[in-house]
Amino acid sequence: MTRIDGNTLIGWGFKPSRQFKDMIGIANELRGRGQDDVSIIDALQATLPPPVVEMPMRTNSLPIGLFIEAEGDGDQANINAVMSHMDALMRIPTIVASAIMPDACPAGSAEGTIPVGGVAAAKDAIHPGMHSADICCSMAISIFERKMDLKKLLDAVQAMTHFGPGGRKSVIQPPAAIMEKFAPNPFLSGLENMAIGHFGSQGDGNHFAYVGTVKSTGKPALVTHHGSRGFGAQLYKRGMEKARKHTAIVAPRVPQHNAWIDANSDEGRAYWEALQVAREWTKGNHFAIHDLVQQKIGAKVSERFWNEHNFVFRKSDGLFYHGKGATPSWSGYAADSNGLTLIPMNCSEPILITRPLAGNAASPADALGFAPHGAGRNFSRTQHLRSDGPDGILSAELATLQGRGLDIRSYCGVPDLSELPSAYKSAAQVRRQIERFGLAEVVDEIVPYGSIMAGDWEKDAPWRKPRKDKATTA
């Protein structure tokens, strides 16, 4: 009796796959029982998974909730770019609804990249590219019970936090209850050292520590802004890898940056759990820094709360709401929510304390329950820096702000001029549009004293320094 092998299966019309080894075993077992070719082929067909039905891209976009209006120079061009991206994004088969917040701006050049200030609701799918590498970028506030010298408070923050590449010199251990969730999760396993090393640090870019006073009470407050740092970026990278593999099979025409993980699969459930760990870590990271500051100044905290604005949320309708720089603005969006959220603008403007509108004044349904996450940009960092010119307009802007009494610091000692207020939309404009569209209710604000950002680390990077002439160094 001739043994059945892979060539036999190919001759019967089967395509080579990982299942060939098992199929050959089954086929030879059936042959040994005296089964003929037709019976064996039928039995092998029954072992194959159902064929994948390709999910096509939509030919037409779906309606988009638009909550942004042009008020100043550059606004309309920015809105047009945002709408172009959202129109392409709405052709992705998993996306069923979307909204654009007043602070929206493009986040990349690839067509269909979700903009900052964009919200996309997906059915049975988690899109890593729609929360980006800065997973759980978020805001946290500690309000102190008694008034104090705000310079001393900001000095304490500068002494106790860490900005820029890498982690702290002195390690702070994250809570064991968080770290024990890493090893069992395939998306987190192996990232433990990075999660420990970066705990108690704030990164770079637009992340900050901000000191001011609560307008209604005069109490001093510390506000921090950052995400899940290096381990979150690695989690995103792993998520994108799995998403691209999955989407290449079920929807090969979908651009890679819009790939998704099946939320109902084992990988989807593991990724969702990993996102929740990133959320716990980031919340703990905020308040670890706040606790260090509190211990240094010896002041009691009367209130603290936090909210993420770059994350994936799941509502009772089962959909996954991807907020790319968008603040959740519905009651009970998370179990640890106290009903208040923070919306920053820039280093010279108050941070808004908001809450969802109640009753008949609830935010519009097509806003999907979100509000802006800040002021947003009309121009990229590079474009903004080009505006500096030979006269040093941006340096003059920084000097003017400091002349007004604002204590604006750069952790590395070199200011990042791309983060000045002129880089962002008018804070008053964004606030007007929050109120005009009924996206949230502003209940209080933090009046600025000063802030710390990472600064321009790249100016000190080795590759930025002029190289000496080889002839003189030989």
Image: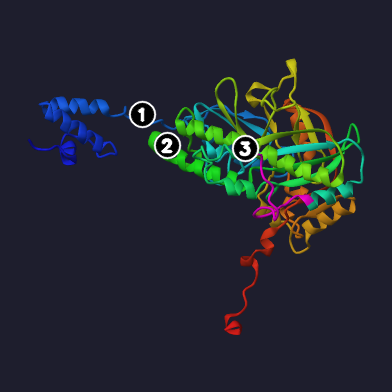
Q: Position of residue 373 (x, y in %)?
A: 70, 36
Q: Which label is found at residue 53?
A: 1
In whole angstroms, how far apart are the C-alphas of marks 2 and 3? 28 Å
Query: Helix or strand or loop: what does disc 1 sit on?
Result: loop
> How would you classify the magenta stretch by its main secondary structure?
loop
101 is within the stretch colored magenta = no
User: In the rendered structure, which segment of residues is drawn in magenta?
Assistant: 160-178
Amino acid beneath label 2: His
Query: Helix or strand or loop: what does disc 2 sit on?
Result: helix
Q: Which label is found at residue 406?
A: none
Q: Can residue 361 be spotted in the picture? A: yes
| Label 3 vs 1, first from the N-terminus | 1
Q: Can residue 118 be spotted in the picture? A: no
Q: Position of residue 364 (x, y in %)?
A: 68, 22
Q: Which residue is mark 3?
A: 178
Disc number lying in front (2 or 3):
3
| Label 2 vs 3, first from the N-terminus | 3
Is 240 on the left or on the right of 197, as rendered? left
Is 276 on the left or on the right of 255, as rendered? right
Report the quarter where the N terminus lies.
Answer: top left
Disc number lying in front (2 or 1):
2
Disc number lying in front (3 or 1):
3
Residue 157 to residue 54: above or below: below
Is 464 on the left or on the right of 449, as rendered? left
